[in-house]
Image (cartoon, rainbow, N blue to C red):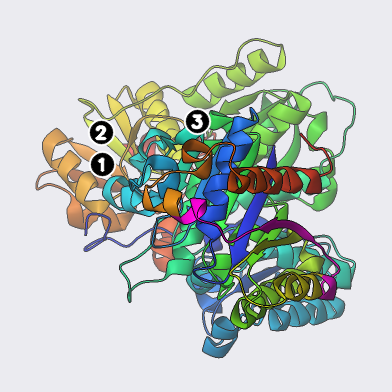
Amino acid sequence: MIKLAIYGKGGIGKSTVSCNVSAAMAKKGLRVMQIGCDPKADSTSLLRGGERIPTVLQVTREKGNALALEDVIYDGAFGVKCVEAGGPVPGLGCAGRGIINALETLEKKGAFELCKPDVVIYDVLGDVVCGGFSMPMRKGYADKVFVVTSGEKMSVYAAANICMAIDNFKGRGYASLGGIILNRRGVEDERSAAETLAADFGSSVIADIDRCEEIPAAEKAGKTVAELFAGSRADEQLSCTAQAILDAFGGAL
Amino acid sequence: MKNAARIIPCYSADTSGVCSALYELGGLTVVHDASGCNSTYSTHDEPRWYDMRSNIFISALTEMDAIMGNDEKLIADTVSAAKDRKPAFIALCGSPMPMMTGVDFDAVAAEVEARSGIRTFGLHTNGTRSYIEGASEALAAVVREYAEPCGKVRGRVNVLGLTPLDLPLGADKHIREWLASHGFECGCTLAMGDSLESIKKLPSAEVNLLVSEAGRGAAEYLKKEYGIPCICGVPFGNGFADELAERLRSAANGSKPVALSTAEAGQAEVIVIGEGISAMSLAEALRRDLGLNAGAINTQPSEGAASGDVLSCEEDIEAALLELRPKAVVADPLYRYILPAGTRLIEVPHFAFSGRCFQRAMVNLINTDIKEYFK
């Protein structure tokens, strides 16, 4: 089993990339589990036809320790197992603590033993703003972090912050940086901005996804590109992204 | 409000369980918590504090350190204290605030170990769970760290889960005497009256005696890694103490371990309330020595626990007693306030429940005639 986390600036396309990469990996015959670590709980919606699923924290609140994994793990496109950690009402509570609680609950209940995934993808909210959002990087969770960025200044800035957090945690045995995923927005010198960022942290740009019509169209329909536009250039690039991520694990699968 | 204790106190928390379990082992126990809370762990919940030295430190976590995620202060202070005290090991555990900010104790422990050169482990307490869970995790951790493969010694028995939170001071001595009187050799008494050296030899025993759920994690580890069978029970009274010795002998000879009788409260005329293994053992002793129809209520639910009726909150215990209307209840004196009218209370103070309040009234019921006490 390999475990990875996808980080990046808010709105940069982490969930879109995560869902499409999950779908592409599942199409290759791998058992994939995607865990949304964002209080908005919309990470897996593209794998579920745009539909939301009950979150771990929501069910924990309702059922307490009686929570069953079947209450929070749902099948998505291509058999991807979908989970949403969930979070508090906006403006209240503590979202970071929520992530910790949800991930600990999944572990305690034996989610991985039940689903036996080959690949676990943690799709994590924006920046590493507190201890809770670094949880997926910790020992025992993701082994590698992939950062999604465009060439836009703010996106690169946020990505650099995330890479710095990974670097700070080096002595703790946390996840290492697996690479940069460039999700193009059509700004000037995008590739070069992403490459500079990667080089600053001794990494590389492992995937390059063009701005295209298929990805937003599939998103609008609540579907993955692999379902709606199989064989398209976007589908091909997302499939290559999935393969590049797998390659970063050095053929562990 | 279901889990709120309105009348009776709540039991000691997981952090106290860690401090109690590791108290005599020569380590440094660091509780990551605000300053001023040391008394909770080391005096209110610790009868040995004034008579026996132990290295228990509180990190004096401040609001700004919590907000800023300043783990460096915890690491540097711990390393400095360790250089000063030279403990055999360092155990780091948490309280509610580090739980909220998500302090990674395993990672902090790795950094402390790298800088101090002293074996360090993180424990995942948060101050909101039962002392049983904290003690069980702490004892399992030291056993994992120190137990070494060694040859079996015929007739050797380890005693696991021994802390003054559940059994009175001197319980280790009484259990040693009882084992010797039945021809056993007492191995390690984890963790009262024993040392790390003895923990290294834990795998040499033929059988483990689990005297409280605090030893559950260690017992499971020793079963899994060294195949040592486990028998649950505290040798209260005479009849049950003899029976327990037979169960140990039989398990040591390779028979399937006999489980502690599920002495559920049901229609019992006498109900013992307390930690599961203690309560069920005392109920068995009352049945055998006094012929009473005795049952037990276990107030400390934990994974893999000996069964029986498990009721952990005041509201449920109060309702169950009202429904069952036993003639007598055997429990800590502070349970008096939730007993139904007409039910007699036989007081057996429980340190994890009432702390030092009734310390002087604590009695030894191990391997002794209990008829007088319960007449």
Rendered view: B195 above or below B10: above
Q: Residue furthest bottom?
A: B64
**Circle 2 residues within 10 Å: few <14, some 14–19, many ≥20:** many
Q: Secondary structure at mark 1?
A: strand
Residue shown at 85%/48% (left/top)?
B197
Q: Chain of mark 2?
A: B
Q: Quick check: A236 left or right of A191?
A: left
**Residue span colored magenta:** A199-216
Displayed quadrant of residue A160: bottom right
Is residue A208 one of those drawn in magenta? yes
Rendered view: B180 above or below A136: above
- Say if mark 1 contacts mark 2, CB within 8 Å: yes
Residue A112 rendering spot, x and y as whole percentages? 57, 36
Q: CA distance from mark 2 to mark 3?
A: 56 Å
Amino acid type at circle 1 is: Val
Q: Earlier in the sequence, mark 1 or mark 2?
A: 2
**Circle 1 residues within 10 Å: few <14, some 14–19, many ≥20:** many
Instruction: Give the quarter of the figure containing the N terminus of chain A.
Output: top right
Q: Residue at label 3?
A: A79
Q: Quick check: A141 left or right of B34?
A: right
Q: Residue at label 2?
A: B270
Q: Residue at label 1?
A: B329
Residue B243 rendering spot, x and y as whole percentages? 53, 19
Rendered view: A13 above or below B320: below
